[in-house]
Amino acid sequence: LRELRLRGEYRVVGGPGSPIPYILAFANMPRLRVLELELAQPEGLEPKPMWPAGYPAATWPWPDLIELTLSCPQAKDRIYRELPNSLRSLSLQYTPHYMDYAWTRATGHSSNAHWQWPLLTTSDMLCILRQCRLPALRHLALEYLEGDSEEQLLKYIALAFPQLTSLKLRRCHWVVDGGDNRERQDPWAVAVSLLQRSLLLAHRHMCACTRLGTYLTAYIVSPPSQKCGDAPRLGRDT
């Protein structure tokens, strides 16, 4: 088996008293190159790391892995420091995206109330990426709670992943019942400012930015045909 893609809701593998980590549940697939786990986190069930720290029986099972997608990432998951140099794509986002859930509630439609979104802060995400040694990474997708460490996070991405060609960001903030009345900067302006001070200094070029309410998805690509010294192309889709 070369590709495994699971979409649905997270379930505990094994008995309640002795759950089996996913790293062990999928260990008998040594030729795996693509692993996508897009699993919603049920409300009331504590999120579990894919590879718990100190778990004695696991060794890295997929030496040829090039794509990894994890829902509900955990800052204390051992898997990040074990990722192989062959990895080209890493996605650490939630299923479904928190911004989709918040938009559904804001528009008065039914929401997936039986799921949860324990969003990582920018500091948590920075802690995760500092464990990764992925010099050949080309694609990175992150979903996190906006915070004061965001500029530091983006600068680290620019330095740690020199081969990066695309970066997808979902910057979230909590939405409370009755709406969020706090004054906020335009998320487009915030993203452009952060990227100009960090990633763009490392010759990354923003091509498009899509905003949904107060949520934002930014894409940054560095086209092979574009020289590093060229002016970045900025665009906005609504």
Image (tube, rainbow, N blue to C red):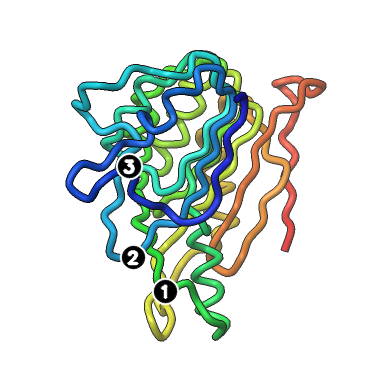
Is 183 positioned to the left or the right of 19 in the image? right
- Can you give x and y, in whole percent of width and height, for residue 36 in the image? 55, 38
Indicate which disc residue 122 carries.
none
The mark that comes first in sequence, 1 or 3, is 3
| Residue furthest front in the image | 15
The one of 164 and 230 positioned closer to us in this rendering: 164
Residue 192 position in % (x across, y down)? 59, 47
Q: Which of 101 and 217 is in front in this view?
A: 101
Can you identify the residue that label 1 sits on?
A: 113
Q: In this view, does 47 lie above or below 130?
A: below
Foreground tag (1 vs 3): 1
Would you name the residue on which mark 2 appears? 43
Q: What residue type is labelled 1?
A: Ala
At x 30% / y 21%, what residue is drawn?
58
Q: Decide which of 232, 96 is in the foreground and name it.
A: 96
How many angstroms separate mark 2 from mark 1 (CA)? 8 Å
| Residue under pointer 3 | 74
